[in-house]
Every structure is written in C-alpha cells, then in structure tokens.
C-alpha cells in the first residue's frame, strides 16, 4: 500500500494554526519543523501511528528535515511544507504534497555511509509551535475575524476557496444540464 495522500490534513493544520505560518526567513526551518508533529497528530486515527519524520543519519549531527513526513509501511517520504515570500516581508509557510518514494541509503553516499530513517515524531523532541497570542485574532472559532485581523494571504486563501466552490457548483450545474439533455435524446 502506498502512502495515502493527506494533503487535506496539511492544509487544515496550516489554516487552524494561521497565527504561526508567517515567519522571518531566518526562523523558517525551525518553524516548519515545529509543524510536523502537529500535522501527524491531525492525521486520521487509523493511519496516524504510521506517520513519522525523516532522520538523516548521514549528517553530523543527525538532521530532521523541516518539511518531510515518512509513511512507515512503505518508507515513502513526502515533502509536505514549503514557503513563499510573505506580503510585507518574511516568509509564509504553505502546504505541499510531493511523494519522493521510498527512503533508504542517502543519495551521494554510494551505499557506504548513513541512512535516512523513519522516526516517531514524539521521539524527535521537536519543540511545540508558538502559542496563539491574544492579539492574533479572535479565539471564538464561531466568530469570524474582523477584516483588519485577517492577513493578506488568508484573504487570498478564502477567495481561492470561494472560487473553487463556485467552480464545483458550476460543474455540477453543467453536469445536471447535460444529463437532462441526454435524457431527452435517449
């Protein structure tokens, strides 16, 4: 069984932790790494224990990349986070889902030294995400934030999702129209 596509989980986690996605470029790697255990914890219960982080033992000291999850049954490694320039400076962490296949002997070592291995995220001692600050917006999930509390990228994300919903509705309407027309000709 290949790794299930859980890109929806990554997107949901970033939306739920929007207060932590904007970061200075110097802090980008650390912040993305802090998202990995949160993403794993948000995975569906049935496959959550199979997700871990990548540990590169061919580096000294060992390295846990900041953007990679590993699916233990097949040892596939997936890039799940990337970053773009944030409006006004810094970086914004964005979702990605790119499966690079099974891990094994580290590239460039001619099979001699170092392995890339699956590691349980709880054993990785990754610090938690920064806590949401009172000025990060409303804490009531049912109360929509005021316009001035929403960052530019959040507005763009909402607009993109609204466009997607509109497009899906348009496709559904077109399909219903075609089905009705097809019935008339059969």
Image (cartoon, helix red, strand yellow):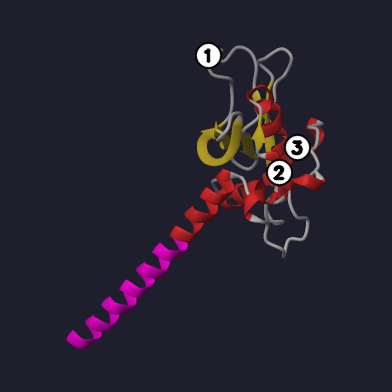
Residue indicated by mark 2: 19
In the rendered image, residue 154, in percent from the top left (x then y), is placed at 58, 48
Name the secondary structure under disc 3.
Answer: helix
Is there CB contact under 8 Å for labels 2 and 3? no
In the rendered image, residue 81, in percent from the top left (x then y), is placed at 59, 37
Relative to 149, say whether 53 is above or below: above
Is there CB contact under 8 Å for labels 1 and 2? no
Read off the magenta span. Answer: 164-186
Relative to 3, say whether 126 is above or below: above
Residue 6: mark: none
Give the residue displayed 63% in from the left and 13% down from the top: 113
Residue indicated by mark 1: 108
The residue mark sitting in front, 1 or 3, is 3
Name the secondary structure under disc 2.
Answer: helix
Is-magenta flag for residue 175?
A: yes
Sequence-first tag of 1 and 3: 1
The one of 164 and 150 positioned closer to us in this rendering:
150
Instruction: Choose top left, top right, bottom left or bottom right for residue 158.
Output: bottom right
Give the residue displayed 67% in from the left and 33% down from the top: 32
The one of 89 and 94 positioned closer to us in this rendering:
89
């Amino acid at each position: 069984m290949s790794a299930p596509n859980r890109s929806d989980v990554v997107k949901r986690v970033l939306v739920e932790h929007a207060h932590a996605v904007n970061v200075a470029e110097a802090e980008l790697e650390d912040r993305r790494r802090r998202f990995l255990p949160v993403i794993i914890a948000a995975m569906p219960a049935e496959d959550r224990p199979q997700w871990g982080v990548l540990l590169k033992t061919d580096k000294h000291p060992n390295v846990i990349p900041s953007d990679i999850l590993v699916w233990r049954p097949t040892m596939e490694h997936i890039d799940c986070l990337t970053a773009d320039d944030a409006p006004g400076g810094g970086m914004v962490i964005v979702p990605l889902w790119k499966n690079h296949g099974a891990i094994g002997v580290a590239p460039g070592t001619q099979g001699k030294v170092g392995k890339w291995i699956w590691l349980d995220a709880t054993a990785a001692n990754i610090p938690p995400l920064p806590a949401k600050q009172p000025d990060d917006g409303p804490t009531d999930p049912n109360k929509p934030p005021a316009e001035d509390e929403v960052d530019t990228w959040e507005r763009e994300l909402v607009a993109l999702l609204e466009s997607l919903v509109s497009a899906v509705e348009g496709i559904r309407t077109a399909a219903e129209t075609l089905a009705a027309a097809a019935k008339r000709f059969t």
